[in-house]
Image (cartoon, grey):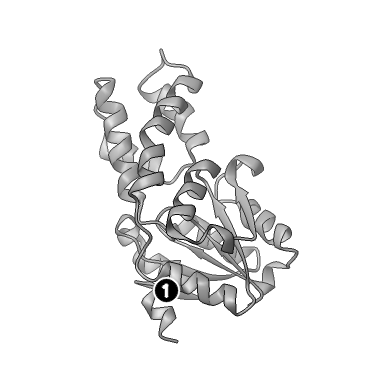
């Protein structure tokens, strides 16, 4: 492995529950109760995809810019001050860095959010490149974001491992020629069998890789 490409939410950061909470707060503040099916649907989408869908489904009177501003206001403090890293992941990233592996981040989130968390956690200086879903204009159901991350590392997909917690990301990265490691998160428990089947490796925690 010459390059490691990490998802952020649910992979490096134990933050997926925070996004669920923030979504609940957002809807509650507008007097809206969403269905469990829609909540699950929104979790698999990028924020750029989610906001127009939320507007269509529930809040036709709001504009996208105001919705985005509300979401970012709710999330900034959590990323800057409180969201923890998953146990062992920072040590694993430091090990890869010391071994000369190039490190990239591929996320559907926002640059200011993940970088503020990385600075607090002491891994900001270990990341060589970033790729964002907003740059490629599609969700992780397409491999574009991973391909962009590899390109920015100056590497081919075959030389990189993608670490990801969502099944659509694992499937698209695998099909694009990357080695894949599926990372357990409470929000992907229902996909465990598919993650096991579709990934090259499946881990329930980062200490599994640290012990190798």
Secondary structure found at label 1: strand
- The percent position of residue 29, horizontal first and vertical second, equals 27, 23
> Quick check: 94 above or below 28?
below
Residue in view at x 50 percent, y 21 percent: 65
Nearer to me, 84 or 170: 84
Residue lying farthest right? Answer: 154
> Quick check: 52 above or below 7?
above
> Quick check: 137 above or below 187?
above
Which residue has dot 1 on it? 202
Residue in view at x 37 percent, y 39 percent: 77
Residue in view at x 47 percent, y 73 percent: 92
Residue lying farthest top? Answer: 61
The answer to whether 71 appears left or right of 148 in the picture is left
Q: Quadrant of residue 134?
A: top right
Would residue 33 be visible to someone looking at this image? yes
Would residue 40 be visible to someone looking at this image? no
Residue lying farthest bottom? Answer: 212
Q: Quadrant of residue 54?
A: top left
- Give the quadrant of the C terminus: bottom left
Classify 10 Å Cα crowding around label 1: few (below 14), some (14-19), many (20 and above): many
- The percent position of residue 190, horizontal first and vertical second, equals 31, 59
Nearer to me, 3 or 177: 3
- The percent position of residue 193, horizontal first and vertical second, equals 36, 68
The answer to whether 24 appears left or right of 203 in the picture is left
- Give the quadrant of the N terminus: bottom right
């Amino acid at each position: 492995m010459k390059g490691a490409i990490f998802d952020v939410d649910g992979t490096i950061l134990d933050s997926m529950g925070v996004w669920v909470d923030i979504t609940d707060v957002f809807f509650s503040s507008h007097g809206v109760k969403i269905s469990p099916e829609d909540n699950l649907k929104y979790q698999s989408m990028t924020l750029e995809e989610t906001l127009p869908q939320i507007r269509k489904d529930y809040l036709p009177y709001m504009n996208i810019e105001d919705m985005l501003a509300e979401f970012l206001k709710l999330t900034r403090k959590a990323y800057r001050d409180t969201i923890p890293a998953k146990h062992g992941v920072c040590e694993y990233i430091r090990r890869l860095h010391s071994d000369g592996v190039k490190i990239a981040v591929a996320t559907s989130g926002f640059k200011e959010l993940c970088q503020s968390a990385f600075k607090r956690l002491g891994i900001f200086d270990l990341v060589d490149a970033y790729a964002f879903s907003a740059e490629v204009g599609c969700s992780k159901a397409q491999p574009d974001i991973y391909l962009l991350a590899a390109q920015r590392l100056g590497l081919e997909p075959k030389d990189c491992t993608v670490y990801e917690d969502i099944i659509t990301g694992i499937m698209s990265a695998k099909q694009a020629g990357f080695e894949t490691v599926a990372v357990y998160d409470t929000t992907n428990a229902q996909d465990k069998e598919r993650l096991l089947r579709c990934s090259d490796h499946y881990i329930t925690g980062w200490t599994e890789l640290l012990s190798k």
